Amino acid sequence: MKIPVHNIRGDTVDEVEVEDSVFDVPFRPAVVHQSVTCLLANRRQGTASTKTRSEVAGSTRKPFSQKGTGRARRGTMKSPLLRSGGIVFGPSPRSYRQRMPKKMRRLAFVSALSAKAREGAIWAVESLDMERPRTKDVVSLVANAGRPASTLIVIPESQPALALSARNVEGVTVRQCSIVNTLDVMSSDKLIVTVPALRKMEEIWGSKRSTDESA
């Protein structure tokens, strides 16, 4: 598969040949859905907590006589039926963490990337080197890419100047290609990827890497 390469001004200047095992894989909705669900679940802290009737503060004394008052029978004021009583079946701290096999994670990621490539949502650029932070340059870059509602900028390595330039631009996220995941790809309308980042993604997720691991 070939992806057009643009300059900062948005002009098409070249084409880059990318590996089909990463950018031209059939879309697997079930695997992608499982990967996104797993990533969202692993973000949860699981710290929500409520108190049962045995944990709330209060007296266990019987509030009034069992008979003769005309009122409902009460054993304690900590009953879940009363105000300030315990909570029935409320949440308690737990782990929501899910695990997904490495091969399934890879399949979900390359499937999502391939879908974006077929849609023309991967916008390759030569490089995004910045000497100093400049938000205006990122705004101009996103405008030249078509002003998508959400944009993921993928770079090969840490670039503090670019990260600082993009953090005040709504809908723009910067990720290194070594930590980008399926959720990042699927939640972005357009991916702006540098050519070195494309090559590094092929190195990390390509068929040669998976063959070496299985050998």
Image (spheres, grey):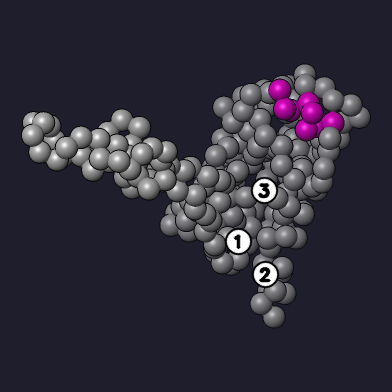
Q: Nearer the viewer, residue 11 or 194?
A: 194
What residue is shown with label 3?
180
Q: Name the residue under label 1.
A: 106
Q: How far apart are marks 1 and 3 (CA)?
A: 12 Å
Q: Few, some or many C-alpha atoms within 10 Å of disc 3 (few <14, some 14-19, many ≥20)? A: some
Report if residue 123 is visible in the image. Answer: yes
Q: Is the magenta stretch mostly helix, strand or loop?
A: helix
180 w.r.t. 209: above or below = above
The spot of residue 172 in percent (x, y) is 66, 30
> Pointers 2 and 1 in contact (CB under 8 A)?
yes
- Left or right: 89 in relation to 9: left
Question: Is 48 within the magenta?
Answer: no
Q: Given the image, on which type of amino acid does mark 3 rest?
A: Val
Q: What element carries label 1?
A: helix
Q: What amino acid type is highlighted by mark number 1?
A: Arg
Rounded to the nearest angstrom, the CA distance separating label 3 from label 2 is 18 Å
Identify the residue position indicated by label 2 in the image: 210
Q: In this view, does 49 lie above or below 149?
A: below
Image location (x, y in percent) of residue 41? 51, 50
Residue type at the position of mark 2: Ser
